[in-house]
Image (tube, rainbow, N blue to C red):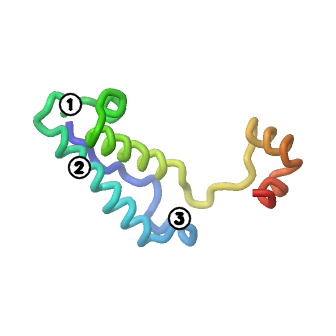
Amino acid sequence: MSFELPKLPYALDALEPHISKETLEYHYGKHHQTYVTNLNNLVKGTDLENKSLEELIKTTEGGIFNNAAQVWNHTFYWNCLAPNAGGAPTGKIAEAINKAFGSFEEFKKTI
């Protein structure tokens, strides 16, 4: 199995002005891709070649662990971002913020 750079769930310019297209091109297209390439090179021809990303993270160390974990971390990060996202929290986190700070607005002022 060969690992691939996962497709972003949005266009490269979709997070502007907060994250520029140039930043995404570099961090996603070069930095993240380098971890994917390195991981493929490290596991090629070994008994680890057909393991999932999660299996590699759980069972390896050193360079294989580092590159596998970075591939997973970056993929998670990109999927946590979205155009026009954000706003006030809801649910249990909103309750905790309101209890501790009185409101989300006070929370933002405090931190």
Q: Position of residue 109 (x, y in %)?
A: 80, 61
Disc 2 residue type (three-letter): Asn
Earlier residue among tags 1 and 2: 2
- When the figure is inspected, residue 42 is found, relative to residue 35, above or below; the finding is above
Residue at horizontal 56%, vertical 60%? Answer: 83
Mark 3 and mark 1 residues within 8 Å of each other at the beta carbon: no
* Residue farthest to the front, as pictured: 62
Q: Position of residue 36 (x, y in %)?
A: 28, 49
| Left or right, residue 13 beside residue 87 | left
Residue at horizontal 56%, vertical 72%? Answer: 17
Density class for disc 1 (Cα within 10 Å; few <14, some 14-19, many ≥20) is some
Q: State the quadrant of the C terminus.
A: bottom right
Density class for disc 3 (Cα within 10 Å; few <14, some 14-19, many ≥20) is some
Earlier residue among tags 3 and 2: 3
Cα separation between marks 3 and 2:
27 Å
- When the figure is inspected, residue 29 is found, relative to residue 98, above or below; the finding is below
Mark yes or no: residue 52 visible: no
Disc 1 residue type (three-letter): Leu
Q: Position of residue 79 (x, y in %)?
A: 49, 48
Determine which residue is flagged by label 2: 38
Q: Classify mark 2: helix, strand or loop.
A: helix
When asked about the image quadrant of residue 25, the answer is bottom left
**Closer-to-camera residue (108/60):** 60
- When the figure is inspected, residue 12 is found, relative to residue 99, above or below; the finding is below
Determine which residue is flagged by label 1: 48
Determine which residue is flagged by label 3: 15
Cα separation between marks 3 and 1:
36 Å
* Residue farthest to the left, as pictured: 45
Mark yes or no: residue 48 visible: yes
